[in-house]
Amino acid sequence: MTKENPEVWVFVEEINSQIKPVSLELLGIGKKLATDLETKLGAILIGYRIKNLASELFSYGAEKVYLVEHPVLSYYRHEPFRDTLAYLAFKYKPDILLVPATPLGRDLAGGVATCLETGLTADVTELAIDKEKRLLLVTRPAYSGNLMATIICPEHRPQITTVRPRVFSIPEKRKQAKGELIEEKIDLKEENLRTQRIGFIPKERVVNLEYAEVIVAGGKGVGGKEGFSLLQELAKLLNGEVGASRLAVSAGWISHEHQVGQTGKTVRPKVYLAFGISGKIQHRVGMQNSDLIIAVNKDPSAEIFQIADLGIVGDWKKVCVALIEKIKRERKP
C-alpha cells in the first residue's frame, strides 16, 4: 500500500446519533473496494455532537474517520451538508465516494457531484474494481430492468455512487478495532442558509421494509385494497411488514413506501411471502436475496417460481386464509 493511492470513502448517515444500518453495509463493500485498490477506507461523519460514533465506524472497517461537527449541521439540510462534503473531497481527493441511496443520500449525492464536476451513478446493485485501470465498475438495472448496465467514470474523480439499503451485508463487528480520527473545521453560519426547520412532525408509523425479517407481499393478482387488508392481517400475525409490487402500488391499493423492486426498496428478509406476484425482473431485483422465498400464484409459468424456494400453484386467497387460521389455532391458549 502506498500513501499516494487515493482513498475509498463512505458517507455515514446518522439520525439522532444513531448510525443507519445502510452505512455499515457500505463500509463492508467499501473495505473490499479499498483492499482491491490497495488503499484505505475512510468514513465521513457530518453532524453535531456525534464524535462518539467514530469508534463504532472503526469497528466496522473504517481506517479513518473524517469528522465535521457544527451546530448548523445538527439536522440535515442540503446546502451545509453539500458544502461540507464537497470541501472535504476537494481537500483530500478520494478516488471513490459511496453514499446511501436513501432520500437524504440521493439528495446529497447529486449536489456534491455537481460541485465536484464529476459523475454520479444511482441505485447500484453491484460494485467491483478493474484493478488494472483502477476504475470502479458500477452495475445497475437499465431499460426498466430488462438488462444490467455496467457504468464507469474514467475521467473525473471522485467516482460517486449511491447504493441501496440491503444490497450488501453488514460486515462482522470488530470491537477492539482502532483508526485515525481527523477532525475538520468549516465556517458555517445559520444566517447564510436559505432553509430553516421550524418544526418536525414524525410519522405515526414508519414502514421498516428494508430490515423486516418477514415480508408478506402482494401483486396484481391480489385484486385490490381488500386483498391487502388480508395480507396486513397475516403480516401482523408474523410480526412482519407488508410489501407490494409496482403494479399494486400504481393501482392505488397500497402506498409507495411498501413497494419492493427496482423503483421501490431492496429487501433481504428471512422469509418473503409473495402472493399474486408474477415476478418480473423489476420486482425480483428488490427481493431475490431473501433467505426463503415462498410464492403463491395461480399461473404455473409465473416467473416468480424461478427463484422461489417453495412454490404453490393455486388461489392466493385460500392459501392466505388457511395460514391465518392455522396460526390463530396454534396460538390459542
Image: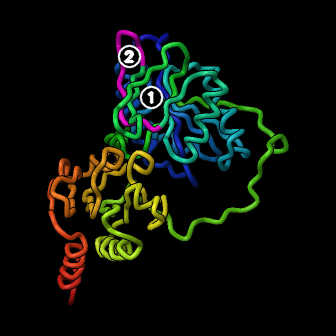
Residue 128, placed above or below residue 192: above
Residue at (60, 24) in percent of width and height: 89
**Could you tell me which residue is drawn at 29 percent across and 58 percent down?**
277
Q: Nearer the viewer, mark 1 or mark 2?
A: 2
Looking at the picture, how far across and down is residue 45, in whole percent? 57, 38
User: Amino acid under label 1?
Assistant: Glu
- Residue in the foreground of this view, choosing between 296 and 74: 296
Magenta stretch, residue numbers: 123-135
On whether residue 128 falls in the magenta region, the answer is yes
Q: Quadrant of residue 270?
A: bottom left
Please say whether residue 6 is one of the residues in the magenta stretch.
no
Q: Which mark is residue 38?
A: 2
Which corner quadrant of the image does residue 187 belong to? Answer: top right
Residue 173: tell me if it is visible: no
- Give whichever of discs 1 and 2 has the lower sequence position: 2
User: What colour scheme has been applied to the protein in the rendered image?
Assistant: rainbow
Element on which disc 2 rests = loop
Q: Is residue 186 above or below residue 251?
A: above
**Residue type at numbered disc 2:** Glu
* Residue 5 position in % (x across, y down): 46, 13
